[in-house]
Amino acid sequence: MITLEFQHIAWLAGLLILWSGFLIAIIKALFRQLVSNLEKGINEDRIAWRKLDSEFKQAQARLPLDYQRREDSIREYTAINMKLDKLYEIFRKA
C-alpha cells in the first residue's frame, strides 16, 4: 500500500507550481516575440505603403507627359489626313 505524507504532497505541488511557472514564462516570451515581429511587420508595411503612394503620385504627375488621350490622337490623325487630302487634290489638279 502506498502512503502519501504531507511532505510528498507538498513536494509534488511545488514541482507542479514550478513547472507551471516555467511554461507560463516560455509562453510569455513567445508572445512577446510574436508581438515584436508583428510590430516590425506593421512598420515595414507602412513604409511599403508610403513608397507605393509616392510612386503612384509620381506616376500621376508624369501621366500627362507620357499618355496621349484617344480623342487627341483621333483629332491629330484627322488633321494630318485633311492636310494630306488637300495635298493630294493640289497634285491631282496639277
Image (tube, rainbow, N blue to C red):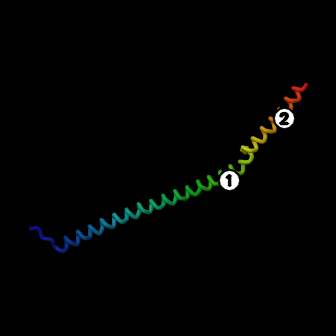
In which image quadrant can residue 50 be found?
bottom right
Q: Quadrant of the C terminus?
A: top right
Residue 66 visible in the current orientation: no
Direction right: furthest residue: 94
Residue 84 - label: none
Q: CA distance from mark 1 to mark 2?
A: 39 Å
Q: Which mark is residue 57?
A: 1
**What is the quadrant of residue 5 in the picture?**
bottom left
The answer to whether the residue labelled 1 contacts the one labelled 2, judged by CB atoms less than 8 Å apart, is no
Q: How many marks?
A: 2
Q: Please, what is the three-letter code of the amino acid marked with disc 2? A: Lys
Q: Is residue 72 above or below residue 1?
A: above
Residue 77 visible (yes or no): yes
Q: Residues within 10 Å of mark 2 (few under 14, many from 20)?
A: few
> What residue is disc 2 on?
83
Front position among marks 1 and 2: 2
Helix, strand or loop under label 1? helix
